[in-house]
Amino acid sequence: LTAKQQIWVYFIVATGLKSAVYVFDLASGIAVVNEHYKAGDNAWATLTLLLMYFPSLVFFIVIISRPDLWDKQHEISGTAKWFSFRAAQFLAYPIWVMYRYAKQLFWSVEALTNEKGREEALLAVTQPSQTELYLFLQPFLQSIPQAFLQLYIMLAHYQLDKQISQMQVFCITTSLMIVAHKTGSFLWFESQKIIQRKEPWSLKVAEEQQTQPSSKETVPIKLKTIAQDSELLMPFLQPHQLPSTVPIGLMNSSMSVEEQSTDNKPTGTENIISLPAYSAPPKPTNLEEIKVAKVSDNGSLPESNAPSHPDSTNIGLPTRKIKTQIKGMEEEDALAKSVAFLWWFFFLFSRILSLAACANFQPFALLGLLVAHYTIITGHLLHRSGFPSIYKVFIQLCLGCMFIFCFIEFRYKLKNVTVFYICYFSLMLVENIGMSLSWYLSDELDSFWYKFVFTIIFGSFFVSVLSMALYFSILKPK
């Protein structure tokens, strides 16, 4: 594709579709709440409305409970205004979401029409925003529970001979589309994070791009900052006990090795900081962790078998241990993302329909099955994490709930992709068969629509497996 075609496909069309689905989902949710209140189902209407606000509430709590996400305020009045702004954002969350999409569309069109400023416009499109954190929470805190709830209500109304609303069908469809898109977007996040993909709500990248020091300035660096930046940008780079200031020769020599190890692909570390050269190097503090090599003024590493002759141009500097290979994953193209979307859409529809049908007829069997599933998955996640901290344990417990419906590689790195997906989808298939047979074999349920639901559950699962096979065999990125 040409540059303009890529802008159309990956920015303008993608952003337009996401904003349209979000608007339709919001409108259908409001319509469903209104219809439930008119029908006298106040409990269902209130629960539907609470689910719409649930991700915004969690987003608000996360923002105000983490000082590192606060805006810099020097006075109490400024802090009060900031808190009021966040409260207004919690109540009127769709405004900020649509502002995010409108900003991306504006800069996408600017990149399409202005070739000279195309690079700056595309940087503005991909600039991180905290609104992306809300958009990440929405599928798992609102869309999945909303689709399950509306499917459960529809099946219950069919048993009671009540009219089924078309807005409920529309709400279920848009909710599943949102979940399928977000699942496909974060399907290989941890593998792609190795080669510099970052959370779209992380503001650290934007601050680094906006505040880059010139080459003539001297910038003091703390040991903690260097270690944290290296772990975030390159997880395999872990410097130990570096001094408070680092000569630029070390940074350049390290970058040259990194660029060779990644097949001349940019790693994103060369633009973070620029430091001047010093006449005398700092002494290494730990000889077990830091190796000493001869580095010339131009920053190139000498041959390992070259003799050591100290002179005025060669100085001894500490170097870092660097792996020669990076096992990461590239980001998918448009075709791969489309097939992944179909894969997860049909799988989610089959999964949630089987859960909702079983909840109508065998609620206690469903409860026992979900408890067993959650125990197995969460036990595996906690065993992998090793109980490092309370925060990470809480993350694993939340991932256990998410993995009941779908899977994303977020805070969980796959070791063997093929084995995991075979086990995961086999477990899901066995659970769907058990839940569906528990009510389908009953003599009391002799109706065309029950047979239709049973057929749709496994038909959607079969289409999902076909899409997954196409994705893994042809379209999966290297």
Image (cartoon, rainbow, N blue to C red):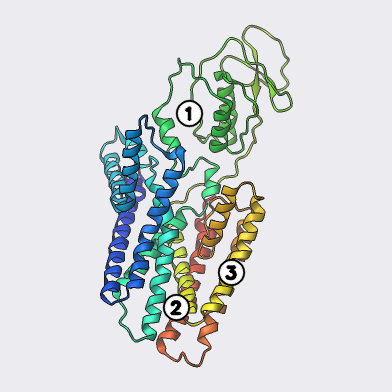
Q: Is residue 53 left or right of residue 472?
A: left
| Residue under label 2 | 456
Residue 234 x/y as whole percent: 56, 36
Identify the mark nearer the N-term, 3 or 2.
Answer: 3
* Mark 3 residue crowding within 10 angstroms, few (<14) / some (14–19) / many (20+): few
Nearer to the camera, 314 or 115: 314
Query: Element at badge 1?
Result: loop
- Callout 3: helix, strand or loop? helix
Horizontally, residue 212 falls left or right of residue 391, namely left
Q: Residue at x 37, y 67 (%)?
A: 47
Q: Is residue 193 left or right of residue 180?
A: right
Q: Label 2: how many residues lie within 10 Å, few (<14), some (14-19) or many (20+)?
A: some
Mark nearer the N terminus (2 vs 1): 1
Q: Residue furthest front?
A: 76
Q: Identify the residue shown where x is 52% and y is 44%.
A: 193
Confirm whether residue 264 shows in the render: yes
Towards the viewer: 455 or 324: 455
User: Disc 3 designates what residue?
Assistant: 371
In the rendered view, would you say 82 is above or below 393? above
Which kind of residue does numbered mark 3 sit on? Val
How far apart are labels 3 and 2 at the CA level? 25 Å
Residue 48 appears in which quarter of the rendering? bottom left
SS at mark 2 in the image: helix
* Residue type at the position of mark 1: Ile
Q: Identify residue for label 1.
A: 272
Where does the image place residue 313, in percent across and percent down from the top left?
A: 61, 9
